[in-house]
Amino acid sequence: MKQAVWMPIAEQEIGVARYPAGQSNPRITQYHENTNIRGYDDKVAWCSSFANWCMQQAGIAGTGSALARSWLEWGAPLQQPRPGCVVIVTRDDPASWKGHVGFYLRSDEEFIYLLGGNQLDEVREHFYPLAFVLGYRWPEK
């Protein structure tokens, strides 16, 4: 697989956002459908659910987990990022279970820029310190 066929799918979702308290965005609930948090609303962390949904739409099996760090065991590791690859970053302590997952857009000396879900409560581009990167992954197919 040479191209990140899931990226056009992810890009179509830009702007999907968490609803205010007392409401839930049904699209985000749909992202959870093939994960271990099926039926949850948009108030739980949904970055991994979004990544799983995008992969499924592209015909690629994801992790089935709502944990961002589950992607560290998925596919094949990459030494360097490539457009659209799955990027896993730490949120707090690199040794903790917490993390975030998104799709690689670009990087500079200081930051990595990802397209992902639950980035400032919506599907959008956002940046993270390059030092927070835990891994880059690509489907094994």
Image (cartoon, rainbow, N blue to C red):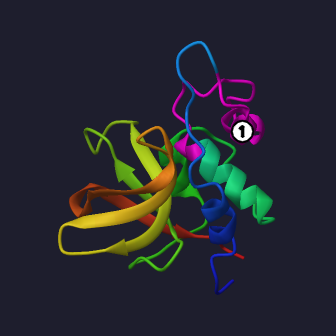
Residue at the image point whose x is 74% and y is 29% from the top: 38
Taking depth in this image into account, of 97 and 7 the one nearest to the observer is: 7
Please tell me whether residue 42 belongs to the stretch shown in magenta. yes
Spot the residue most to the bottom. Answer: 2
Q: Is residue 34 above or below residue 72?
A: above
Residue 13 in the image: state x and y as whole percent: 64, 54
Q: How many numbered dots are placed on residues in this image?
A: 1
Is 120 positioned to the left or the right of 44 in the image?
Answer: left
Q: Quadrant of residue 104?
A: bottom left
Residue at the image point whose x is 26% and y is 38% from the top: 92
Mark 1 residue type: Arg
Is 17 positioned to the left or the right of 30 in the image?
Answer: left
Please tell me whether residue 102 belongs to the stretch shown in magenta. no
The residue at which mark 1 appears reads as 27
Q: Is residue 7 above or below residue 33?
A: below
Q: Quadrant of the C terminus?
A: bottom right
Q: Residues within 10 Å of mark 1 (few under 14, many from 20)?
A: some
Q: Quadrant of the N terminus?
A: bottom right
Residue at the image point whose x is 59% and y is 38% from the top: 66
Residue at the image point whose x is 61% and y is 66% from the top: 75
Q: Is residue 108 above or below residue 130?
A: below
Circle 1: element type:
helix
Residue 21 in the image: state x and y as whole percent: 53, 16
Residue 98 in the image: state x and y as whole percent: 39, 37
Taking depth in this image into account, of 35 and 127 the one nearest to the observer is: 127
Residue 99 in the image: state x and y as whole percent: 40, 43
Q: Quadrant of residue 132?
A: bottom left
Magenta stretch bounds: 24-48
Spot the residue most to the left. Answer: 109
Q: Is residue 72 above or below residue 91?
A: below
Is 90 positioned to the left or the right of 68 in the image?
Answer: left
